[in-house]
Amino acid sequence: MASLAHKLQPLLRNAIANKNPVAHTPYFRAFTWSISRVQRRTTQGTHDHVLIGEVDRFGGVTVNLREGDFTSDISEGLFSNLLRDALAQWRTEGQTAVWLRVPISLSRFVAAASVHGFTYHHAKKDRAVLALWLRHGQSRLPGFATHQIGVAGAVVDESNGKVLVVQDKNKTVNAWKFPGGLSDPGENIGTTAVREVFEETGVRSEFKSLLSIRQQHNPPGAFGMSDMYIICRLRPLTYAIDFCTQECLRCEWLELTELAKTDDTTPITSRVAKLLLHGLNQGFDKIDLAMEELPAVHSGRFYQLYHRELAPA
């Protein structure tokens, strides 16, 4: 790091001397501060640690603590001093907030951070994220994710009016339902539906449309989060059933008319079965929310928009 500072220092001086616009960006200010601290450490021949943060476009500083950067002899008190100096610098620069990512192996630093006003934002696997609002007034930082997303696939065989249903093995009431499960991070809704249907039933399918969305707050097993349950319409590509015996008690192709009127199902499954019957008889364009992929404001990114199809102009 010291050698890197030595190589970059002339570039930084030239940028400042030539009044390069980049010299006035938050990233540049944070980096020049980091380099100057490293250079001073080298000149003095000491081994002091420096907290280095990355500044985002909102003025938030993210500090990733890594176990290799902190030896066991660095106490909570020393870390507290480093954090105090860093916070003073970031406040001077006008940054808005600090995100402190702490691995479990460095959890001894959490108490030290709390002294400076940090609070838990969230934790995942082996890392906790703490946050501190640096501006005056109430924090405007966004809260952590509040919903989990469950997706089910209603696989409809249009040739005979049947739909693929399962009975969960571990439910107290073995009601017919559409196969499905939780969406993985970064996974599109249709992809989740197709994956879950295949994992539970062995039937391959393709996504056609979104049918319904249910919102429920604080359901069992959701750790206090809210739940979004989405049912999609899928078209079967194969028909042979090879269901997962670990998850499912039964799996069948069931008549939609029977599913719509049976008591051996859930209210949402019964309602969607009636919706599918209407689409089968009147046309699925009457019930489908089709997906269209559109470019996002952020360059190089896309999103999926679900809506009723518009009539041709």
Image (spheres, rainbow, N blue to C red):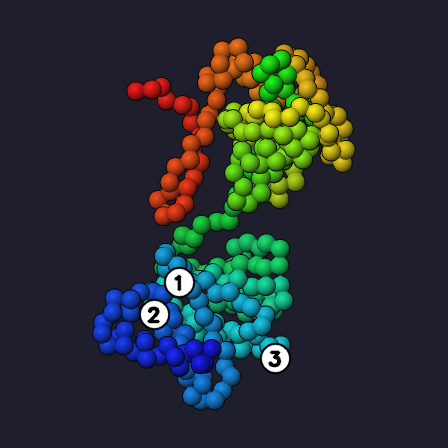
In x, y percent, where is residue 174?
Answer: 74, 25
Q: Please name the amino acid that badge 3 sits on.
A: Asp
The C terminus: image quadrant: top left
Q: How crowded is mark 3: few (under 14 residues within 10 Å), some or many (20 or more)?
A: few
Q: Mark 1 points at which residue?
A: 55
How far, Cα to Cα, is label 1 from label 3? 29 Å
Q: Is residue 163 above or below residue 21?
A: above
The outermost residue toward the bottom is 44
The numbered mark, 1 or 3, whose residue comes first in the sequence reads: 1
How far, Cα to Cα, is label 2 from label 1? 9 Å
In x, y percent, where is residue 227?
Answer: 57, 36
Q: Nearer the viewer, residue 78 or 214?
A: 214
Please name the residue shown 48% across and 67% down the image: 116
The numbered mark, 2 or 1, whose residue comes first in the sequence reads: 2
Q: Please name the amino acid that badge 1 sits on.
A: Val
The numbered mark, 3 or 2, whose residue comes first in the sequence reads: 2
Please name the residue shown 37% across and 40% down the image: 295
State yes or no: discs 3 and 2 in contact (Cβ < 8 Å). Answer: no
Label 1: element kind: strand
Q: Can residue 14 be seen in this view?
A: yes
Q: Quadrant of residue 228?
A: top right
Q: How crowded is mark 2: few (under 14 residues within 10 Å), some or many (20 or more)?
A: some
Q: In which quarter of the image is residue 214?
A: top right
Q: Nearer the viewer, residue 219 or 278?
A: 278
